[in-house]
Amino acid sequence: MSGISKDSDTQGELVSFTTDDDVRLHGALFTNSRVASHDIAVIGTHGSGASFYTSVTGFLCPALPSLGYTALSMNMRSHDRFDAQVTFEGCEQDLAAGVKFMKEQGFKNIVLFGHSFSVTQIAYYMAQAKESVVVGLALSAGHDDLRGLSPLLWESLVDDHKAEERRVLAQCRALVEQGDGDRLIIIPLWRPDPKLNLRQKYRAISAQTYVSNKAPESNCNASLWIPQIQAAMLFIAHSVVDTTARPEMMQRLQVLATKARSTEYVEIEGSGHFYVGYQDQFIGAVASWLDGLRN
């Protein structure tokens, strides 16, 4: 897998590992033959419906070895179309398997990088696992409370968006109770800033996934877990609201990180959710924070 990085001395080895509940996950382990690796390694995770070789982790992880950081870009079980079928709590086993894999590579200090949906997944994992080998979290374009955003998906699409969300949730609960939780429904993907005049997009999601991610009792709520985490944290936001992720959400998470050893907030002005055109600035922000963490 050479050629993904701008540095010809960076190589990506395809790897796989299995979670405790027997889910096989795949990824790429990026190293550099010229630059010695520091004692901190990075595990990169993707957002909703993405994968280890796409989106933000797809450009971040191949870039880090040139700067001295071995990086594993890994699939979550919610990668690609599986995003519509799995329940939220499986993220704990996925991240535990990734951490175990990197510990087996000899690393005793690990930073977890998460983008968008995986910000909430990492927060949940860290609150449950309290894994001491994870010394830092780099969190990008996440949400403070994804389940609380559910009614907003329907805003401006129906007369009463809150009533519509309650109707959809009741429908999904009924399907799950009937043993038909795999049944797919169609919901809005996100509600960006109306001033951008972006085309409305929709997505398929199973009834059981909808309940798991969006019901009031869902664990899909980073605000609940961030205050419990002691690791150092970097919060990265973008200024263009082209999805439901907004900079103030990351600012709120930083305020809630009261037990963190340290926090830092970076906002990349002009960038949208996927940092297209701002990749080098994004990589630089993460690398600078990693250097400070190491020193």
Image (cartoon, rainbow, N blue to C red):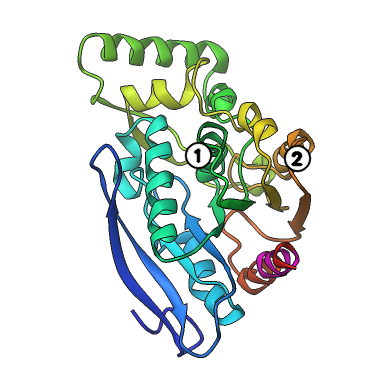
Provide the secondary structure element on which disc 1 rests: helix
Q: Was residue 195 drawn as part of the magenta stretch in this picture?
A: no
Q: Image point 55% across, 86% down: which residue?
A: 35
Residue 16 vertical placement versus 246 (above, below)? below
Question: Is residue 240 rendered to the left or right of residue 175?
Answer: right
| Residue 110 locus on image (x, y percent) | 55, 58
Q: Residues within 10 Å of mark 2 (few under 14, many from 20)?
A: some
Residue 272 visible: yes
In front: 128, or 148? Answer: 128
| Residue 63 locus on image (x, y percent) | 54, 75
Q: Nearer the viewer, mark 1 or mark 2?
A: 1
Q: Earlier in the sequence, mark 1 or mark 2?
A: 1
Locate the C terminus and report the quarter of the image it occupies: bottom right
Q: Image point 44% across, 64% down: which residue?
A: 72
Provide the secondary structure element on which disc 2 rests: helix
Q: Quadrant of residue 91?
A: top left
Question: Is residue 151 rendered to the left or right of residue 12?
Answer: right
| Residue 241 locus on image (x, y percent) | 66, 47
Which residue is identified by label 1? 121
| Residue 42 locus on image (x, y percent) | 53, 62
Q: Main secondary structure of the magenta part?
A: helix
Q: Image point 49% across, 58% down: which residue?
A: 44
> Of the residues shown, which amino acid type is indicated by label 2?
Glu
Q: Quadrant of residue 228?
A: top right
Q: Label for residue 248?
A: 2
Which residues are drawn in magenta? 286-292
Q: Image point 30% across, 9% down: which residue?
A: 174
Please state the total of marks drawn on the protein image.
2
In front: 221, or 166? Answer: 221
> Of the residues shown, which amino acid type is indicated by label 1?
Gln
